[in-house]
Image (cartoon, rainbow, N blue to C red):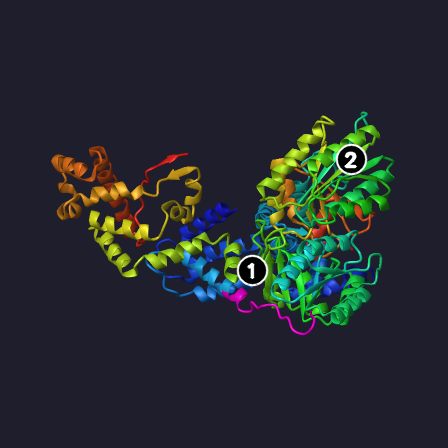
């Protein structure tokens, strides 16, 4: 999925290549890809549309850092906007009163009962003694499931097997909690469709009876376009206080989170990351943004490049490239910068399109060592003017660096080729970290 | 009168009103279109279609493929009336679902258990967590039992709390035997036991419930392979079928699920659940297209009778925007 996305971004980048800033014209193709990425992540159609519009407005006229391409910057802006959007309202659980109460609601199979157990375990840890109340009177064995879950986390469960009156169970559960000094009540309910009037009436009545501080809408991270409609309908009836996003340990990109957030404006409070009772995380907007955009490697590449590459240095190199005076000394400096950015394979893997090329290839992290030692064995004059390196100089350099003469020859040849290539690129106006053939082998 | 009924048929009125409000062209345009019965295939129209398909979870790639072919055809016939357009669309979309030339689009794809060869016919049910596997099994058991088969269930979801109990309750309601061991026991052993007693009791059909598992969990996925292998030790061809249950409200991830489950277990059919809500389940177009796996049944409620046969034509119509519907 990730490679796929990268391929598409790469295609989009082609259009943007060689432009110094983001303009109406060059932004179009990339935004189309951004929109596609959002829709592939199951972000709601209208939300995606509006979001892309916003990113465009934000991006227009932004100056592009010389070291990265406009397309990449655009992805970064998208990421920033996503994070901003989902991060603004992230909020902790509000537990007030004796007992505090939490109502769980959602569609069938969203993961309410499992989440009830996880939440109970977490609340117990925080010092309040929780009571689970089993109000799923519809699904066969749902009460048994909550009993088992309660037992596994060491939390009491209030249930009335065979009783079909969810409101009554909730009321009596609350009363028990009050009289017996529980610190929190978690009410598990049956899964229901938003259009099921009877069951929606039932849960409204449960809510009225319990008067919970928190009503959490539990939703499967794999949900598609329907997430918005469902969330809206539940919100209209229950005015929920937050969202729990479950099954995030799958590989769904979870665009539903963004849709729900932007449509009903309620914060995502928890994410479920597994079937074990401790697999509950608080929501991290940034990680979610990463996910929606396809793990965000492009984003982190841009970020790392921004951190590591000195803009001034990049400009200096660019000027040299333009005048075609780029020499081995500069090459060495570039290698230093690339090394600063981290593990070579990781780094190359993050370059759009490279992920695929690198598949199954074993890249030595010390790939640059040979190159470095050879250049370091040259005199400053040789570095500035590689053409003076004759046979005897080659022999000396090989000996000094501990490599063979062939290695030295190969490097010089590669450098010549690279310079030629960069000369033509520089005329196109695109500064770039020099590419080179990596010593690697197919695994 | 007939004309206005057609335009404002009562059951369609609410949604039609909405449609009108959304419409850029306004009421007059739409009415005149109904009069002339023709609409140009233009960018606006294609955009409307795109929105409708994506909102049904058909996915960007599949939507673009469908619209691309429609656009190509439109260069031949720039003006079409609604029914022609509907036909074109249906053809494009149905082409993705049904590759079988002999099958009419109006036919259902319901699965008929082949006549008994003395061995039980075995269907293993798989899927991610919470899609409705156990409920679907109950419905299938009810359906096949009603058709006169002796059905047995194997409770091989020994992982999720009370999953065995859930299946047992269903077994009682439907009136079929459930073979189970305790929670936490080896699912492959349960499947083995189930098949052995099915053979002994001359059951016609065995449905094996499995624990929900996310398709990216390698260990759990290979466990499915093991369950499958163990069953073939009792009945050589078992399982004869492996059905993947998909939640109708799942978005594009369903494609990934289908791919991964197919890799491990050779999925032969799909059950699409929870279609009684507002979700459309359009992602099965891409799944059928890419994996050539037919949808066998559709779940439309929580009762054991709430299982329907899948009719490609009806399904397709439910995905398309209402302004494209033929006569109400």
Check disc 2 and report its element: helix, strand or loop. strand
Report the number of numbered marks.
Answer: 2
Apparent side of residue A79 relative to residue B280 in the rendered image (left or right)? left
Are dots 1 and 2 in contact, CB under 8 Å?
Answer: no
Residue at the image point whose x is 81% and y is 25% from the top: B118
Which quadrant of the structure image shows residue A440? Answer: top left
Instruction: Give the extent of the magenta segment.
Output: A84-101
| Residue in front for this viewpoint, A259 or A306 | A306
Q: Residue at x 78, y 48 (%)?
A: B166
Q: Position of residue B154 (x, y in %)?
A: 76, 38
Residue that badge 1 annotates = A48
Identified at 28% across, 57% down, the residue is A314
Question: Would you say A332 lies left or right of B170 here?
Answer: left
Image coords of residue A43 (percent x, y) = 58, 57
Q: Give me the chain letter of mark 2.
A: B
Q: Specify the quadrant that holds the N terminus of chain B.
A: bottom right
Residue B206's label in the rendered image is 2
Q: Is residue A99 magenta?
A: yes
- Image check: B56 left or right of A157? left
- In percent of the image, x 74 and y 71: which residue is there? A178
């Amino acid at each position: 999925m990730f490679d796929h996305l990268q391929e598409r971004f790469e295609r989009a980048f082609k259009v943007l290549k060689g432009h110094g800033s983001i303009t109406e014209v060059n932004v179009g193709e990339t935004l189309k890809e951004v929109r596609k990425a959002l829709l592939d992540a199951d972000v709601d159609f209208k939300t995606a549309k509006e979001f892309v519009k916003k990113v465009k407005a934000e991006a227009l006229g932004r100056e592009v850092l010389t070291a990265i391409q406009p397309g990449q910057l655009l992805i970064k802006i998208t990421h920033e906007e996503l994070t901003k959007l989902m991060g603004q309202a992230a909020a902790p659980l509000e537990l007030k009163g004796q007992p505090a109460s939490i109502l769980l609601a959602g569609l069938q199979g969203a993961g309410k009962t499992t989440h009830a157990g996880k939440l109970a375990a977490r609340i117990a840890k925080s010092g309040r003694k929780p009571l689970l109340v089993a109000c799923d009177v519809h699904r066969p064995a749902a009460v048994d499931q909550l009993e088992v879950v309660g037992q596994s986390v060491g939390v009491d469960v209030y249930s009335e097997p065979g009783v079909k009156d969810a409101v009554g169970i909730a009321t009596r559960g609350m009363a028990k909690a009050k009289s017996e000094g529980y610190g929190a009540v978690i009410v598990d309910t049956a899964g229901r469709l938003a259009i099921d009037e009877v069951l929606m009436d039932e849960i409204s009545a449960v809510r009225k009876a319990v008067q919970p501080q928190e009503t959490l809408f539990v939703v499967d991270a794999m949900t598609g376009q329907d997430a918005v409609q469902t969330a809206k309908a539940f919100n209209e009836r229950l005015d929920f206080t937050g969202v729990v996003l479950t099954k995030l340990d799958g590989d769904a990109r979870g665009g539903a989170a963004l849709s729900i957030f932007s449509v009903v404006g309620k914060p995502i409070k928890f994410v479920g990351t597994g079937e074990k009772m401790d697999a509950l995380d608080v929501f991290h907007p940034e990680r979610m943004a990463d996910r929606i955009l396809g793990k965000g490697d492009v984003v982190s590449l841009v970020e790392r490049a921004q951190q590591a590459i000195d803009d001034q240095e990049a400009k200096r190199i660019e000027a040299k490239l333009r005048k075609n005076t780029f020499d081995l000394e500069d090459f060495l400096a570039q290698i230093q910068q690339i090394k600063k950015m981290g593990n070579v394979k990781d780094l190359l893997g993050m370059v759009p399109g490279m992920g695929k090329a690198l598949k199954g290839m074993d890249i030595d992290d010390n790939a640059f060592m040979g190159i470095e030692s050879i250049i370091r064995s040259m005199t400053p004059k040789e570095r500035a003017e590689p053409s003076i390196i004759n046979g005897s100089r080659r022999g000396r350099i090989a000996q000094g660096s501990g490599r063979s003469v062939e290695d030295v020859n190969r490097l010089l040849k590669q450098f010549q080729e690279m310079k030629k290539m960069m000369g033509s690129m520089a005329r196109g106006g695109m500064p770039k970290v020099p590419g080179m053939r990596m010593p690697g082998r197919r695994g | 009168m007939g004309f206005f009924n057609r335009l404002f048929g009562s059951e369609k009125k609410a949604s039609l009103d909405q449609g009108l409000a959304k419409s850029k062209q306004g009421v007059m345009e739409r009415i005149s279109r109904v009069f002339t019965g023709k609409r140009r295939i233009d960018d606006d129209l294609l955009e409307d279609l795109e929105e409708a398909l994506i909102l049904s979870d058909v996915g960007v790639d599949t939507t673009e493929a469908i619209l691309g072919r429609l656009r190509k055809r439109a260069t031949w016939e720039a003006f079409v009336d609604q029914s022609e357009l509907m036909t074109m669309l249906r053809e494009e979309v149905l082409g993705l679902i049904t590759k079988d030339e002999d099958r009419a689009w109006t036919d259902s794809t319901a699965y008929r258990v082949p006549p008994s060869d003395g061995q039980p016919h075995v269907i293993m049910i798989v899927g991610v967590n919470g899609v409705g596997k156990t409920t679907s099994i109950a419905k299938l058991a009810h359906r096949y039992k009603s058709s006169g088969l002796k059905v047995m269930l194997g409770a091989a979801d020994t992982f999720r709390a009370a999953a065995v109990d859930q299946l047992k309750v269903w077994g009682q309601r439907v009136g079929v035997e459930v073979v189970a061991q305790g929670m936490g026991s080896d699912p492959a052993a349960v499947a083995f036991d189930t098949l052995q007693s099915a053979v002994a009791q001359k059951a016609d059909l065995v449905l094996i419930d499995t624990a929900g598992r996310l398709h990216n969990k390698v260990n759990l996925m290979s466990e499915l392979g093991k369950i499958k292998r163990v069953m073939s030790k009792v009945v050589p061809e078992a399982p004869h079928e492996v059905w993947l249950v998909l939640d109708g409200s799942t978005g594009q991830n369903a494609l990934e699920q289908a791919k991964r489950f197919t890799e491990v277990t050779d999925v032969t059919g799909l059950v699409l659940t929870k279609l009684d809500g507002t979700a459309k389940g359009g992602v099965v177009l891409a799944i059928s297209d890419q994996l050539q796996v037919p949808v066998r049944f559709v779940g439309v409620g929580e009762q054991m009778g709430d299982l329907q046969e899948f009719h490609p034509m009806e399904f397709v119509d439910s995905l398309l925007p209402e302004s494209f519907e033929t006569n109400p």
